[in-house]
Image: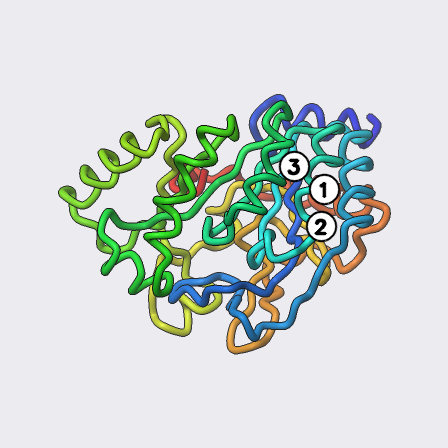
């Protein structure tokens, strides 16, 4: 059986995600307390590059992947990010993870060109109150997000909200849902995930342990190599965590794909991975 046929089979039976994740960069304008990648304004950039991202997308499409996810760091710190997303979306649907703080008038005008493309922005917002939210994510985060989301929605950009759950009360959860409805975000476009004990969260003693067998496999590429999951290419105390590294070789993409398929054949399917989806 060809590699493409093997991938198609695993994607069809739900064993493997059809989305390929790309870590566009590692630097960020925030320094969240639970950040997997220890991203911050002073973190090394570790940029994957526009041409490389497009090249990986083309290879992914040829192999049978059906979507692209872009994360970081903060992808929108890269001046060419909107152009790259436009190019990638000509090949596969794209979801970009962002903290939602960089959508000033110029960027909003830029991104409006994507309104007819299969592109969604997944914006982080953890709490319904600015004080509690910004304590985890950084000063001014809440205000910038609640300002940006309705403007993006009005411009026809698909917006999802991702909330990282850490000691959240039922009342907070309900108030957050109400806030998101007011901002124009549909209930089905709200993703809630746990803090994972990796990166800065692990140093701070936060989050749940998530070994390979608990994380659903989603091939992920960064400048450091290919990984089992977008939760995997993390840094802790400035050092790359390699426990979920598949291979340092990412070109051609067939190399990490083959490695991942081999590992899938000897790894039991997680009994409950819903918290990470």
Quadrant (top left/top right/bottom left/bottom right) for the N terminus:
top right
Q: Is residue 122 left or right of residue 167?
A: right
Q: Residue at x 59, y 65 (%)?
A: 27
CA gap, disc 2 and disc 3:
17 Å
Q: Is residue 17 visible?
A: yes
Q: Position of residue 76 (x, y in %)?
A: 59, 52
Q: Is residue 18 visible?
A: no
Neighbour tally class for label 2: few under 14, some 14-19, many 20 plus, Cα within 10 Å = few
Give the residue at mark 1.
83
Q: Residue at x 69, y 56 (%)?
A: 222
User: Where residue 68 is drawn, which disc sits there?
Assistant: 3
Does the CB distance between marks 2 and 3 fall below 8 Å? no
Q: Position of residue 109 (x, y in %)?
A: 59, 39
Quadrant (top left/top right/bottom left/bottom right) for the C terminus:
top left
Relative depth, front residue between 82 and 169:
82
Looking at the image, which residue sits at the far left?
Answer: 171
Q: Earlier in the sequence, mark 3 or mark 1?
A: 3
Q: Earlier in the sequence, mark 2 or mark 3?
A: 3
Give the SS element for disc 1. helix
Give the residue at mark 2.
80
Relative depth, front residue between 80 and 227:
80
User: Where residue 97 is drawn, which disc sits there?
Assistant: none
Q: Tell me the quarter of the picture where residue 92 sits.
A: top right
CA gap, disc 1 and disc 2:
5 Å
Q: Tell me the quarter of the picture where residue 93 sits.
A: top right
Q: Tell me the quarter of the picture where residue 123 sits.
A: top left
Relative depth, front residue between 55 and 159:
159
Q: Position of residue 152 (x, y in %)?
A: 47, 35
Q: Is residue 26 left or right of residue 103?
A: right
CA gap, disc 3 and disc 1:
15 Å
Looking at the image, which residue sits at the far bottom?
Answer: 237
């Amino acid at each position: 059986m060809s590699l493409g046929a093997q991938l198609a089979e695993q994607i069809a039976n739900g064993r493997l995600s059809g989305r390929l994740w790309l870590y566009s960069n590692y630097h960020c304008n925030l320094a969240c307390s639970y950040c997997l990648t220890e991203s911050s304004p002073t973190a090394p950039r570790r940029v994957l590059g526009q041409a490389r991202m497009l090249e990986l997308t083309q290879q992914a499409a040829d192999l049978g992947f059906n979507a692209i996810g872009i994360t970081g760091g903060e992808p929108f710190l890269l001046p060419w990010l909107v152009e790259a997303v436009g190019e990638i979306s000509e090949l596969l649907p794209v979801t970009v993870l962002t903290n939602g703080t960089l959508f000033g008038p110029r960027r909003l005008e830029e991104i409006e060109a994507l309104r007819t493309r299969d592109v969604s922005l997944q914006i982080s917002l953890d709490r319904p109150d600015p004080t509690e939210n910004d304590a985890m994510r950084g000063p001014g985060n809440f205000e910038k997000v609640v300002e940006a989301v309705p403007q993006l929605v009005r411009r026809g950009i698909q917006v999802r909200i991702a909330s990282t759950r850490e000691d959240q009360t039922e009342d907070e959860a309900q108030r957050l849902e109400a806030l998101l409805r007011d901002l124009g975000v549909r209930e089905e476009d709200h993703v809630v995930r746990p803090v994972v004990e990796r990166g800065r969260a692990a140093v701070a003693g936060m989050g749940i342990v998530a070994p390979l067998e608990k994380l659903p496999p989603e091939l992920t590429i960064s400048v450091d190599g290919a990984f089992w999951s977008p939760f995997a290419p993390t840094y802790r105390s400035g050092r790359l965590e390699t426990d979920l590294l598949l291979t340092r070789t990412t070109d051609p993409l067939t190399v990490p794909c083959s490695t991942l398929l081999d590992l899938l054949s000897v790894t039991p399917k997680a009994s409950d991975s819903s918290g990470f989806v």
